Image (cartoon, helix red, strand yellow):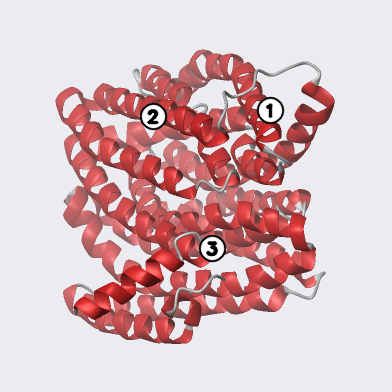
Amino acid sequence: MAAVWRRLRGVRHQTRNTTAGLQFHAVSQQVAFAVLGVVRAALVVRALGPGRYGLVVTALAVAGIFSQLLHLGLGTGSAKLVARAADRSDASRMVASFLAIRAVALVPIVGALVLIGGPVAGAVYGSPNMDAYVGLAALTVVTSAPTDILLSSLTGLDRFHPYFRLKLGYEIAQTVFVPVGTILFGIVGYFVAQAATNLVLSVGGFVEVRRSLGCPIAKPRWSDFRTVVRPVLRTSGAIYVARLLRTLASLLPLLITGAVLGTTAGGQLGLGMKAASYVDAMAAGVVVVALPRMTRLRSELGASAVVERFAGNFRRISRGMALIVTPLIVLLPIALPLVAGPGFRTAGLVGVVAVCASALLTLGSAVGSGIFLPLDWEWRWVRAQLVAVVAAVAGSIVLLHLTGSPIGAAAAALLAYAVLAGAVARSLATIGQARFFLEGCARVVMWGFVGIGVLLVLPGLPGLGVVAVITIAHGVFVVREDHALLRAFSA
């Protein structure tokens, strides 16, 4: 046993900063975050109940739409452009430019959220306190304003381990303070605790970026407009539009459900989709590593090297997705009512559909960050997101009318992300590289059908036992098949 442990420690040391090693670390961390998120959500939902939790979800959805106007694609853009920076001085000027643009946009957008978004939400959803809850959600937007820029800049500087430490501290703090605030002070306590932990993360990110640069973050200058700000706006503008469209594809079914069926149904949909979003969150760490690494690879070796390297990397992502989709499909109908209470049985069924939707979204997003953005294909990514939004809105209206249930909105999200995957495949076909993406999607869909089949034939704990055996066997096969994971070589 001691010899095995020494060998594992040696492998970890050798691969600490390789792409595969960092991705494995990131995914492992996201799994831990998912566990913490389940604990946090269980405590919050039980403290608030279905009705009040639906108010929280609705307020966050309204704030989420306005916050997209604030983000402007600057987080992802900073990871890409800082990775391309010629030196630390150039990187410092870029970070300063990103932060300055965010600061200029902050006041009018947050003002519009409080003065317009809150009253409109109160009128639409019929809650006398909705405008106050939207105002509290705006506080969380303010305290988190610089966070994505600072953390993405760390990845662009190839400082992944400080990034991982900051994220871990933030998740632990949220798991402690958000439920405590909710239990003690209800909805107000929830939002105040969220805002406080966001502020701590923002301050920590600023200190770590300054330390990584080895100098103070430069003050923005008017002379930087042509050399820094204009390229930042051009790149981040396209990324922003894509991110806004992706957010709309996720939030519009939720808002339409709340307006048509009431905020309680919106809460059922919100919890089911939140649980399913852990699929996307687990792969987010892979994307965080891939974007700056692939961008730097393109600068050094060219576009063909990016496509070739990421194709192999994507196979690992799709295998990981296939590995977690099956157990989640069987687990959620059992776990959500157990964790959140019997009033959330519908959320478990929503989660089954939403898991499949989230898996397709994850695969499309992985290609978007690993190929489209490093190759400067931002507007192709925008077009793919646009067709997904149209499908989400049209599907929500039709399927909610047909089903009269939040499950219809979840099915609309699945339709939207299937359309997104088709658009991604079409773009990859123009360079003869659609096959690896379609193979990955087919792999995930196949294992999704396995999970649904087990759920239909053996619902409950017997099905969960069968899936546990299947998942272990599948995991052993994946590790044996993937020599990069088995030996932790760089992908």
Q: Which mark is residue 19?
A: 3
Identify the element where label 2 is drawn.
helix
Residue 452 image point, x, y percent:
37, 75
Reply above or below: 88 against 387. Answer: above
Amino acid type assigned to the residue bearing label 3 in the image: Thr
- Per the model, the C-alpha gap separating discs 1 and 3 is 27 Å
The first of marks 1 and 3 along the sequence is: 3
Residue shown at 54%/55% (left/top)?
289
The mark lying in front, picked from 2 and 3, is 3
Q: Residues within 10 Å of mark 1 (few under 14, many from 20)?
A: many
Q: Which mark is residue 198?
A: 2
Amino acid type assigned to the residue bearing label 1 in the image: Arg
Res 325 quadrant in image: bottom left
The first of marks 2 and 3 along the sequence is: 3
Residue toward you, 363 or 412: 363
- Per the model, the C-alpha gap separating discs 2 and 3 is 28 Å
- Per the model, the C-alpha gap separating discs 2 and 1 is 24 Å
Residue ID for mark 1: 93
